[in-house]
Image (cartoon, grey):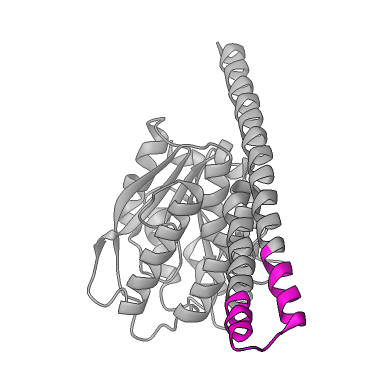
Amino acid sequence: MKNDVCVLIPTLNEAKTISDIVKKFLTDGYRVLVIDGHSTDDTRELAASAGAEVIVQTGKGKGQAIQQAFATIEDEYVVMIDGDGTYLPDEIGVVLAPILDGQADHVIGNRFANFSKGAFTRLNLVGNKLLNKMFGLIYGGWLNDILSGYRAFNKRAYKSIDLNETGFEIETEITVECVKKDLRIVEVPITYLPRRYDASTKLNPLKDGIKIGMAIYKLARLHNPLIYFGIIGALFTLSGVAVGIYVVNEWFLGITHVPLTILATLLIIIGFQLFIFGLIANMIATLHQEVMREIRHGLLEQGCLLAA
């Protein structure tokens, strides 16, 4: 079974940790693919000397690296893990188990089940919880750790998801795609360690957190357009109401603001129109999702009959 598993490690300047990670997986009998984002240290050389297959990605960003890897890999199972030493290679069995048992198509390692002191800053913890709640509200998938970098996929999962994000938003997009494609998602508890004191982080909690939040919202256009257009519509409507309150208050004082009255009216009308558009788009999206779900189920049943 281990011959059917590819361990995928996207890297960028992970010379301090990559060799030990690769050696551990190879010792356990797994194939290791390191896809490197143009590291300026010895990451590629150390990974290759440890026995990994090394590919230099054609573009930039973790997301682009994963897209390229998924298009290249043909193994039955893929385990994705960061190369910074914050995850334990020994826990690969925990991450793979639900897939090998036929219970899941995609497994997410939940870092919050067992994280060491110093692994998260207070800002990291608050930001992650907010993003997880935001994801659940929009997509209906109430998960504990949508940003985990320790994941497993069967071939059906990693070949069927369509990815476009190129940066750290990629974990969010993977999770959204799995929800959209009606793939079975299971979370398992894993250990999360702090980064080595001499290893720098590429993640800016505030900047990248905002990007991830925007990605969650942006991806809602096709999955939950009522939320997407409803929020925009609410902003227009509230702006119109605010301007309208000012205009009415000034009118009571004997001051007339014709342009502002027109602006308030337009903002409120646009807000309601966006909300109605969101309702219509949501009905279309729901119908599309149901049709695609039936098609996927039909194909799966047909595949099972052919296999039998």
Residue range corresponding to the magenta coloring? 243-268
Residue at 33% x, 45% y is 93
Out of 7 and 111, give the one closest to the viewer. 111
Work out whether residue 52 can be spotted: no
Direction from residue 233 to residue 125 in the image, left or right = left
Work out whether residue 270 can be spotted: yes
Relative height, residue 220 to residue 157 (above, below): below
Q: Give the mark count.
A: 0
Relative height, residue 16 to residue 224 (above, below): below
In the image, residue 184 lies at what x, y percent?
46, 37
Question: Which corner quadrant of the image does residue 285 belong to?
Answer: top right
In the image, residue 253 lies at what x, y percent?
59, 88
Q: Main secondary structure of the magenta part?
A: helix
In the image, residue 70 lies at what x, y percent?
62, 50
Which quadrant is home to the C terminus?
top right
Residue at 58% x, 63% y is 234
Residue at 66% x, 62% y is 271
